[in-house]
Amino acid sequence: MRTAKYNIGQIVRHREHPFRGVVFDVDAQFSNTEEWYQSIPEGNRPLKDQPYYHLYAETEATYYVAYVSEQNLMPDVSGEPLEHPELTGVFGDFEDGRYPLQHGLN
């Protein structure tokens, strides 16, 4: 089992797709449905045995929740906050390039 590279509240960016997101949960390895996994084109399927991140994600056009393998993420160095509407329910104000948790985790 590998240790997760990214932390809750950290802003990350997808390596190939044009979106950024804030980590709000981490699975030590793939923990979604097989149907979801098979929907990824075979040549692009990431390994299952790595951390997967739940993100409040956004593009220039929309907000959504994403589930992304560690190999497809990189740190976001823009220093810019996100505008995802679900951030305020979980995190405090953007500071020092990240979002602090507003409440403790269960």
Image (tube, rainbow, N blue to C red):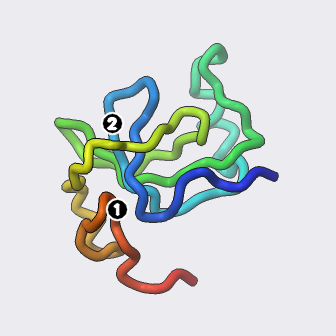
Q: Residue furthest right?
A: 1
Residue kind at label 1, given as amino acid type: Arg
Report the residue at 25% width, 66% height from top: 94
Residue toward you, 1 or 42: 1
Report the residue at 72% width, 32% height from top: 47
Q: Badge 2 local density, few (<14 within 10 Å), some, or many (20+)?
A: some
Say which quarter of the image contains residue 60: top left
Alpha carbon of mark 2 to alpha carbon of mark 1: how far?
16 Å
Residue beneath label 1, please?
98
Q: Which mark is residue 1?
A: none
Residue beneath label 2, please?
19
Q: Badge 1 local density, few (<14 within 10 Å), some, or many (20+)?
A: many
N-terminal of the pair, mark 2 or mark 1, is: 2
Report the residue at 22% width, 42% height from top: 62
4 horizontally vs 53: left or right? right
Whether residue 88 is situated above or below residue 66 in the rendered picture: below
51 horizontally vs 77: left or right? right
Report the residue at 24% width, 56% height from top: 84
Count up the numbered dots.
Answer: 2
31 horizontally vs 105: left or right? right
**Secondary structure type for disc 2:** loop
Q: Quadrant of the C terminus?
A: bottom right
Residue kind at label 2, given as amino acid type: Phe
* Residue 93 pos. (x, y %): 23, 72
Residue toward you, 83 or 10: 10
Residue toward you, 72 or 42: 72
